[in-house]
Image: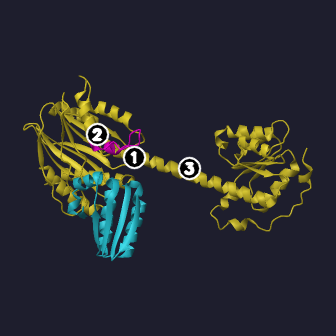
Chain colours: A cyan, B yellow
Amino acid sequence: MNYQIDVKDKILEAKLSEKITFSDLDGFREMISCMVENRSDHNVMDLSDVEFIDSAGLGMLLLARDEISKISSRLTLKSPQGQVQRMFDVARFEQMFDIVSP
Amino acid sequence: MLPVSSRCLILSLPERGASQYETATFDDILDCPVLIVDDDELHCQLISIILSQDGFRNLHFAFDGRQALHKAQEVKPELIILDILMPNVDGLEVCAALRAMAQFKNIPIIAHTIKHAPEDRAEIYAAGATDIFPKPVSEREVQNRVYMHLKYARLVKGLKQYHRRLERDLDIARSMQNALLPERSRLADISRSHGVEIKYYYETSDELGGDFWGIDLLDRDRLFIYITDFSGHGVAAALNTFRLHSLIANYRTTPGGEITQPAEYLEKLNHDLFKLLPVEQYATMLCGIIDLGQNIFTYAAAASTVPVKLRTGSGEVSCLDPSGLPLGMIATASYENRTIPFHQGDLLFLYSDVMTESRNQKGQMIGEDNFIELCGRINSGLGRNQAFLDQLMKSFDMLVVRPLHDDLTAVTLKR
């Protein structure tokens, strides 16, 4: 997994790419810490370039949701594609996350 | 004959003593047996004085190659300082002979020699030496290198022990996980009593995983089946399988815990798991009741893999709906009961996600669509006495590159 963070007008956008799997847990946690430290009003994870997510990856999204809610900030998942979208559908992620697909 | 230069060595003993090492946790290093081999007795003495000054107190000597091998057996040194040019058996032969013995395979052997031109060094290392002290000797170098090699040897030994212990623990954990699965003899009984033939394949990964499955007989006509997989893998996932297994076992013995509908069952499990699991951990599950009287399978899913129904002698594949909130993500979740026909000749296939997420020889992930297509192809091409699961596993083995990154569970139930 790779990610790049941009902050503009109190919105933090992280653009993730490649895969989010068990072996990316450390990198993902680091990204969450970065979001928490930044304390933006709104955090967006752009998933349009993520080609694959596994069960541990979904777990990391839950962790992000939890950590970000603790600082009373918002989290939006943007543009999941292909297998990622399918995983979200199967796990009914729309019930737990704010997901936008512009 | 001893080289003149070493005879002329003037000793200036270091001021530093054993105390310098006492802050480290390695003070027992000074008690390690060290064997010093040199055909020149004076030279042995010289090394002995240098090491003694530094606090080493378990020093042994040999004065030729043959004696060195003999002495090594006797004192079991943890480090050997070995002269190379010796009469009869020379240092290179001693070194090679020691390396051939299991107990000396990995101990530090330091060649102490006048012969240290590049080609000589290559020969010495090829014989199995760990390091080379060029003669003439430098006392500070001897002390530092001996101490360093003993310390490294100790660290490596500690790591190996730790690794072995960890492997043993993982083996135990794996066999404990195996014990969570239904016994084969019980499955044979169910096949006789209910006419449902159950086969399964289970393989643990190098790391631990979070898979298991189970079956309960509800009455003459009904079987309850479940398959589950915890998020991630490793020790945390494995420990969670035990948590879930004991929850399930508790339900069996608690009044009101009886299985009525799959959706209710998942709701109850979700509620209980939510209280037990950290936020990023969850389980996926599929559970359902096969009703042989009504020829139906009623199931509920919590984000499982896509269950597949196949018909004997046909390429027809029905995919069941795996969607539903994973278990343990939110405090209260509701699930749907879904019902499909399940007749004589039908086969239900449940499996863990490693089957679709493994990679083929070209490095591509198999993927859900390809996997389901493979299931249909195998089922329609089955010979008379061939079982679907056996054939599928053969194809899977040819397709994927091992080792698998997660546990593999595959279960078939056939009427």
Name the chain under label 1.
Answer: B
Main structural element of the magenta stretch: helix, strand or loop? loop
Q: Residues within 10 Å of mark 3 (few under 14, many from 20)?
A: few
Residue B97 figure quarter: top right
Task: Mark 3 vs mark 1: tell me if same chain.
Answer: yes
Q: Above or below — where is B271 with respect to A82?
A: below
Assign a secondary structure to mark 1.
loop
Comparing marks 2 and 1, which lies closer to the viewer? 2
Question: Which chain is mark 2 on?
Answer: B
Q: Can residue B71 be seen? A: no
Camera sees residue A39: yes
Depth-wise, is mark 3 or mark 1 nearer the camera?
Answer: 1
> In the current view of this chain or complex, which residue is farthest to the top?
B384
Image quadrant occupied by the N terminus of chain B: top right
User: What is the three-letter code of the residue carrying label 2?
Assistant: Phe
Q: Position of residue A10 (x, y in %)?
A: 33, 77
Which part of the image, by quadrant, shows the C terminus of chain B? top left
| Chain under disc 3 | B
Q: Position of residue B366 (x, y in %)?
A: 33, 42
Q: Where does label 1 land, which residue?
A: B405
Residue B331: quarter of image:
bottom left
Q: Residue at x 71, y 68 (%)?
A: B20
